[in-house]
Image (cartoon, helix red, strand yellow):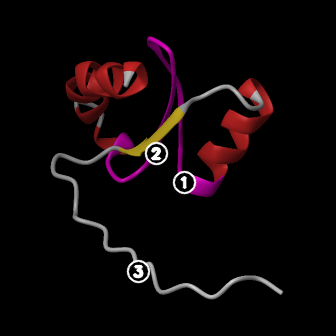
Amino acid sequence: ERELETFRRELPLLLSEPANHGKHALIYNDKVYGVWDTVDEALAAGYDAFQLDSFLVKEIVERERPRHFSRNVSRCP
């Protein structure tokens, strides 16, 4: 929740830079630690920096698109 508040607070600044649109911000506690092109790059940087501590990766967009996930998933063998 703390990271989400930080993201919401910093979003106008992140959006003010056109190069950030559509990229992914890495947030830890009260700080944006950087912006990456893909969610996978941002996640990898977060795990490298913060290991198992909680952090947040969010896409930098004016309006979030709804994401739909299915619960109909098979178990791994």
Real-space Cα distance between discs 2 and 3?
24 Å
Drawn side of residue 46 relative to residue 10, left or right = right
In terms of secondary structure, where does tag 3 sit?
loop
Q: Indicate left or right for 39 with 68 as reference.
A: right
Give the mark, 1 or 2, whose residue is nearer the N terminus. 2
Q: Work out whether residue 62 can be spotted.
A: yes
In this rendering, the answer to whether 37 lies above or below 71 is above
> Picture quarter containing residue 47?
top right
Residue 37 vs residue 53, the one in the foreground: 53
Name the spot of residue 64 as percent of width and height, x first. Answer: 22, 54
Read off the magenta span.
Answer: 20-40
* Residue at far left of view: 63
Q: Answer with mark 2 or mark 3, whichever residue precedes in sequence.
A: 2
State the SS at label 2. strand
Vertical placement of residue 56 versus 42, above or below: above
Rendered image: mark on residue 24: 2
Q: Which residue appears farthest toward the right when viewing the image?
A: 77
Q: What residue is disc 1 on? A: 39
Q: Nearer the viewer, residue 38 or 46?
A: 46
User: Mark 2 belongs to which amino acid?
Assistant: His
**Disc number for residue 70:** 3
Earlier along the polypeptide chain: callout 1 or callout 3?
A: 1
